[in-house]
Amino acid sequence: MLRIVQAPNPVLSTPAKPVTKIDKSLHHLLKQMEEALISARDPEGVGLAAPQVGKSLQLFIIKQTPRSPLLVFINPHIESSFDAPKEKSSEHPTSISDDQKNAKEDKGVQLEGCLSLKDIWGVVKRDYGLILSYEDESGKKHRKKFEGFIATIIQHECDHLNGILFPKRVLEQKGKLYKSIKNTKGQQEFEEIEL
Protein backbone atom coordinates (compact mmCIF):
# COMPACT_ATOMS: atom_id res chain seq x y z
CA MET A 1 0.00 0.00 0.00
CA LEU A 2 1.11 3.56 -0.70
CA ARG A 3 2.52 5.47 2.26
CA ILE A 4 1.38 9.02 2.94
CA VAL A 5 4.37 11.34 2.64
CA GLN A 6 5.09 13.55 5.66
CA ALA A 7 6.36 17.14 5.70
CA PRO A 8 9.02 18.40 5.05
CA ASN A 9 9.32 16.08 2.01
CA PRO A 10 10.06 18.37 -1.00
CA VAL A 11 7.26 16.82 -3.12
CA LEU A 12 4.80 18.56 -0.77
CA SER A 13 6.24 22.03 -1.42
CA THR A 14 6.64 21.70 -5.20
CA PRO A 15 3.83 22.54 -7.65
CA ALA A 16 2.56 19.32 -9.26
CA LYS A 17 2.69 18.59 -12.99
CA PRO A 18 -0.45 18.29 -15.12
CA VAL A 19 -1.75 14.80 -15.89
CA THR A 20 -1.19 14.28 -19.63
CA LYS A 21 -2.53 10.74 -20.04
CA ILE A 22 -5.38 8.92 -18.32
CA ASP A 23 -4.42 5.27 -18.65
CA LYS A 24 -4.17 1.99 -16.75
CA SER A 25 -1.26 3.17 -14.61
CA LEU A 26 -3.22 6.27 -13.53
CA HIS A 27 -6.23 4.10 -12.64
CA HIS A 28 -3.90 1.88 -10.60
CA LEU A 29 -2.58 4.97 -8.77
CA LEU A 30 -6.15 6.12 -8.06
CA LYS A 31 -7.00 2.70 -6.57
CA GLN A 32 -3.89 2.83 -4.37
CA MET A 33 -4.72 6.39 -3.27
CA GLU A 34 -8.25 5.31 -2.35
CA GLU A 35 -6.84 2.46 -0.21
CA ALA A 36 -4.43 4.88 1.50
CA LEU A 37 -7.21 7.39 2.19
CA ILE A 38 -9.65 4.79 3.54
CA SER A 39 -7.02 3.21 5.79
CA ALA A 40 -5.87 6.56 7.27
CA ARG A 41 -6.60 6.65 11.00
CA ASP A 42 -5.99 9.16 13.75
CA PRO A 43 -6.95 11.30 11.98
CA GLU A 44 -9.23 9.88 9.31
CA GLY A 45 -8.87 11.64 5.98
CA VAL A 46 -11.47 13.15 3.67
CA GLY A 47 -9.14 14.02 0.80
CA LEU A 48 -5.79 12.98 -0.60
CA ALA A 49 -3.65 14.67 -3.27
CA ALA A 50 -1.14 12.80 -5.43
CA PRO A 51 1.85 14.72 -3.95
CA GLN A 52 0.87 13.26 -0.55
CA VAL A 53 1.75 9.81 -1.88
CA GLY A 54 4.95 11.03 -3.52
CA LYS A 55 3.53 11.59 -7.04
CA SER A 56 3.90 15.09 -8.49
CA LEU A 57 0.62 15.05 -10.44
CA GLN A 58 -2.36 17.44 -10.60
CA LEU A 59 -4.76 14.94 -9.11
CA PHE A 60 -6.70 14.45 -5.89
CA ILE A 61 -9.51 12.33 -4.49
CA ILE A 62 -12.24 13.11 -1.95
CA LYS A 63 -14.33 10.81 0.23
CA GLN A 64 -16.28 13.03 2.65
CA THR A 65 -17.57 10.17 4.82
CA PRO A 66 -17.02 6.39 4.83
CA ARG A 67 -20.34 6.01 2.95
CA SER A 68 -19.73 8.81 0.44
CA PRO A 69 -18.77 7.94 -3.12
CA LEU A 70 -15.14 8.51 -4.08
CA LEU A 71 -14.73 11.66 -6.19
CA VAL A 72 -11.77 12.06 -8.54
CA PHE A 73 -10.41 15.43 -9.69
CA ILE A 74 -7.74 15.52 -12.42
CA ASN A 75 -6.07 18.78 -13.52
CA PRO A 76 -8.47 20.84 -11.36
CA HIS A 77 -8.69 24.61 -11.71
CA ILE A 78 -10.65 26.93 -9.40
CA GLU A 79 -12.27 29.39 -11.79
CA SER A 80 -13.92 31.53 -9.13
CA SER A 81 -14.99 31.47 -5.49
CA PHE A 82 -17.74 33.11 -3.46
CA ASP A 83 -19.04 33.78 0.06
CA ALA A 84 -22.13 32.18 1.55
CA PRO A 85 -25.40 33.65 0.25
CA LYS A 86 -27.34 35.90 2.65
CA GLU A 87 -29.95 33.23 3.50
CA LYS A 88 -27.12 30.98 4.75
CA SER A 89 -25.87 33.70 7.09
CA SER A 90 -27.36 31.97 10.16
CA GLU A 91 -24.92 29.08 9.57
CA HIS A 92 -21.99 31.49 9.22
CA PRO A 93 -22.63 34.33 11.69
CA THR A 94 -20.88 37.57 10.81
CA SER A 95 -22.07 39.62 13.78
CA ILE A 96 -20.20 37.79 16.57
CA SER A 97 -17.59 39.77 18.45
CA ASP A 98 -13.87 39.09 18.05
CA ASP A 99 -13.78 37.72 21.61
CA GLN A 100 -16.56 35.23 20.81
CA LYS A 101 -14.87 34.26 17.55
CA ASN A 102 -11.50 33.70 19.23
CA ALA A 103 -13.11 31.70 22.04
CA LYS A 104 -14.89 29.55 19.45
CA GLU A 105 -11.67 28.96 17.52
CA ASP A 106 -9.68 28.27 20.68
CA LYS A 107 -12.08 25.45 21.57
CA GLY A 108 -11.01 23.62 18.40
CA VAL A 109 -14.06 24.45 16.28
CA GLN A 110 -13.41 24.33 12.51
CA LEU A 111 -9.83 23.10 12.87
CA GLU A 112 -8.23 21.97 9.64
CA GLY A 113 -5.69 19.16 9.59
CA CYS A 114 -3.65 17.22 7.05
CA LEU A 115 -2.58 13.59 6.67
CA SER A 116 0.93 14.85 5.77
CA LEU A 117 1.25 16.91 8.98
CA LYS A 118 0.50 14.53 11.80
CA ASP A 119 -1.02 16.13 14.91
CA ILE A 120 -0.91 19.72 13.53
CA TRP A 121 -4.17 21.70 13.26
CA GLY A 122 -5.24 25.26 12.53
CA VAL A 123 -8.19 27.49 11.70
CA VAL A 124 -8.19 28.40 7.99
CA LYS A 125 -10.71 30.84 6.56
CA ARG A 126 -11.77 29.34 3.24
CA ASP A 127 -14.28 30.55 0.66
CA TYR A 128 -17.78 29.14 1.15
CA GLY A 129 -18.09 27.99 -2.47
CA LEU A 130 -16.31 27.76 -5.79
CA ILE A 131 -16.61 26.93 -9.46
CA LEU A 132 -14.19 24.17 -10.43
CA SER A 133 -13.18 22.85 -13.84
CA TYR A 134 -11.58 19.38 -13.85
CA GLU A 135 -11.48 15.98 -15.54
CA ASP A 136 -12.75 12.75 -14.03
CA GLU A 137 -11.08 9.31 -14.15
CA SER A 138 -12.54 8.63 -17.63
CA GLY A 139 -11.13 11.90 -19.02
CA LYS A 140 -14.52 13.64 -19.19
CA LYS A 141 -14.32 17.39 -18.57
CA HIS A 142 -16.54 18.99 -15.92
CA ARG A 143 -17.30 22.52 -14.71
CA LYS A 144 -19.17 22.38 -11.43
CA LYS A 145 -20.21 24.48 -8.42
CA PHE A 146 -19.29 23.22 -4.93
CA GLU A 147 -20.36 24.70 -1.58
CA GLY A 148 -19.72 24.16 2.11
CA PHE A 149 -17.50 21.40 3.46
CA ILE A 150 -16.65 19.86 0.07
CA ALA A 151 -15.55 23.31 -1.19
CA THR A 152 -13.23 23.56 1.84
CA ILE A 153 -11.75 20.14 1.05
CA ILE A 154 -11.25 21.10 -2.62
CA GLN A 155 -9.43 24.31 -1.64
CA HIS A 156 -7.17 22.35 0.75
CA GLU A 157 -6.36 19.74 -1.93
CA CYS A 158 -5.80 22.37 -4.66
CA ASP A 159 -3.31 24.02 -2.30
CA HIS A 160 -1.46 20.67 -2.15
CA LEU A 161 -1.24 20.64 -5.95
CA ASN A 162 0.34 24.11 -5.77
CA GLY A 163 2.89 23.06 -3.15
CA ILE A 164 1.11 24.82 -0.26
CA LEU A 165 0.40 23.21 3.12
CA PHE A 166 -2.41 24.61 5.27
CA PRO A 167 -0.13 26.13 8.00
CA LYS A 168 0.99 28.67 5.39
CA ARG A 169 -2.66 29.80 5.07
CA VAL A 170 -2.99 29.95 8.87
CA LEU A 171 0.11 32.16 9.09
CA GLU A 172 -1.02 34.39 6.19
CA GLN A 173 -4.31 34.91 8.05
CA LYS A 174 -2.43 35.57 11.30
CA GLY A 175 -4.14 32.59 12.91
CA LYS A 176 -2.95 30.01 15.41
CA LEU A 177 -1.58 26.50 14.98
CA TYR A 178 -2.29 23.71 17.43
CA LYS A 179 -0.72 20.36 18.24
CA SER A 180 -3.07 17.55 19.19
CA ILE A 181 -2.14 15.45 22.19
CA LYS A 182 -3.85 12.61 24.03
CA ASN A 183 -4.72 13.30 27.66
CA THR A 184 -4.49 10.68 30.41
CA LYS A 185 -7.97 9.39 29.45
CA GLY A 186 -6.89 8.95 25.81
CA GLN A 187 -9.01 11.88 24.63
CA GLN A 188 -7.71 14.36 22.07
CA GLU A 189 -6.81 17.84 23.31
CA PHE A 190 -5.25 20.79 21.48
CA GLU A 191 -2.26 22.80 22.64
CA GLU A 192 -1.32 26.08 20.93
CA ILE A 193 2.04 26.07 19.16
CA GLU A 194 4.21 29.11 19.85
CA LEU A 195 5.18 30.73 16.54
Image (tube, grey):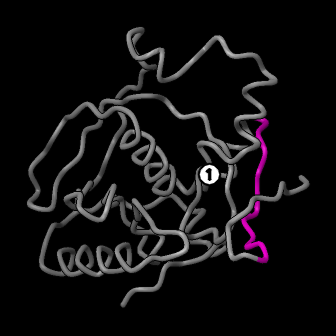
Q: Can residue 74 be seen in this view?
A: yes
As rendered, which of 121 and 54 lies closer to the eye? 121
Residue at 59% across / 58% down in the picture? 113
* Side of 151 relative to 195 (left or right): left
The mark tally for this picture is 1
The three-letter code of the residue at mark 1 reads Phe
Residue occupied by mark 1: 166
* Side of 123 relative to 61 (left or right): right
Q: Is residue 132 magenta?
A: no
**Place of residue 139 in the rendered image (x, y in percent of width and height, measured from the top left):** 11, 56
Residue at 68% across / 66% down in the picture? 188
Look at the picture and state if 68 lies above or below 111: below
**Place of residue 100 in the rendered image (x, y in percent of width and height, measured from the top left):** 75, 25
Q: Is residue 183 magenta?
A: yes
Extent of the magenta region? 174-184
**Place of residue 176 in the rendered image (x, y in percent of width and height, measured from the top left):** 78, 45
Residue at 15% across / 62% down in the picture? 137
**Secondary structure state at the residue bearing disc 1:** helix
Q: Rate crowding at label 1 as few (under 14), some (14 to 19) or many (20 or more) other CA atoms within 10 Å.
A: many
Residue at 16% across / 55% down in the picture? 136
Q: Quick one: quadrant of the N terminus?
A: bottom left
Look at the picture and state if 39 lies above or below 129: below
